[in-house]
Image: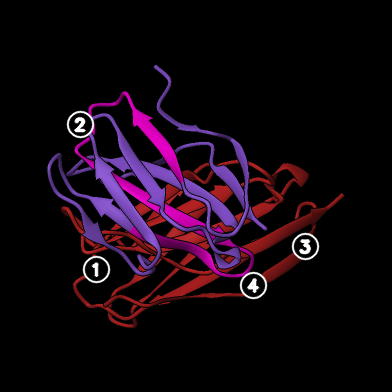
Chain colours: A purple, B red
Amino acid sequence: NAGVTQTPKFQVLKTGQSMTLQCAQDMNHNSMYWYRQDPGMGLRLIYYSASEGTTDKGEVPNGYNVSRLNKREFSLRLESAAPSQTSVYFCASSEVPDNTQYFGPGTRLTVL
Amino acid sequence: GENVEQHPSTLSVQEGDSAVIKCTYSDSASNYFPWYKQELGKRPQLIIDIRSNVGEKKDQRIAVTLNKTAKHFSLHITETQPEDSAVYFCAASPGGYSTLTFGKGTMLLVSP
């Protein structure tokens, strides 16, 4: 039981490049989330998917897109990376009624 | 939307002392209040949570109190140990399929 997994662990991009961050969970959770973590800013929600087939914007969605591929997988895409997107990205999943969010190990992204 | 304020941003204590971290929230509909611990370079992990039908919950050396009238909740750690050193995040949610709103975090340093 791996929980929530993310790939890659580290990535360096040049401004304007694109990439997709992958997330998968094996806990049969309906809800999945993407957060970014910046120093002093806490965890800010980018996008979430309450259930398979639905996605919604969070607090900081600009510059990102998401795809809920199936119940297990939720990907985050940066179409044209900017230095302001340098951050650590966490994926998480949860299930009602417990609502405990389980986090993946994170992806450290640097945009030059 | 929900707004969660967390204080202090940093907290230094001596081993064996108690530590208290406080959070306030704005949305009276919130009824789920988890606390996460994040060690350096690791993912956030749930350490304790409280729901609005109780005022206090304990788990060994940690406890959380909730005052719904005043819209604040607190994390109490007794007999602190060096391994308690980490960043702690509070969060609030109306529950169900609603999202979590996180505070900006408190860096706790426990000195031997």
What amino acid is found at the position of numbered circle 2 in the picture? Lys
| Mark nearer the viewer, 3 or 1 | 1
| Mark nearer the viewer, 4 or 3 | 4
Residue A68, compared with residue B26, is above or below; it is: above
What amino acid is found at the position of numbered circle 1 in the picture? Ser
* Tag 4 and tag 3, C-beta contact below 8 Å: no
Residue A23, located in which quarter of the rendered image?
top left
Residue B112 position, x and y percent, is 87, 49
Report the residue marked by disc 2.
A71
Query: In terms of secondary structure, where does tag 4 sit?
Result: loop
| Mark nearer the viewer, 3 or 2 | 2
Report the residue marked by disc 3.
B13
**Start-end of magenta stretch:** A19-46
Label 1: chain letter: B
Would you call the spot at circle 4 few (<14 residues within 10 Å), some (14-19), or many (20 or more)?
some
Report the residue marked by disc 4.
B9
Q: Which is nearer the N-term, disc 4 or disc 1?
A: 4
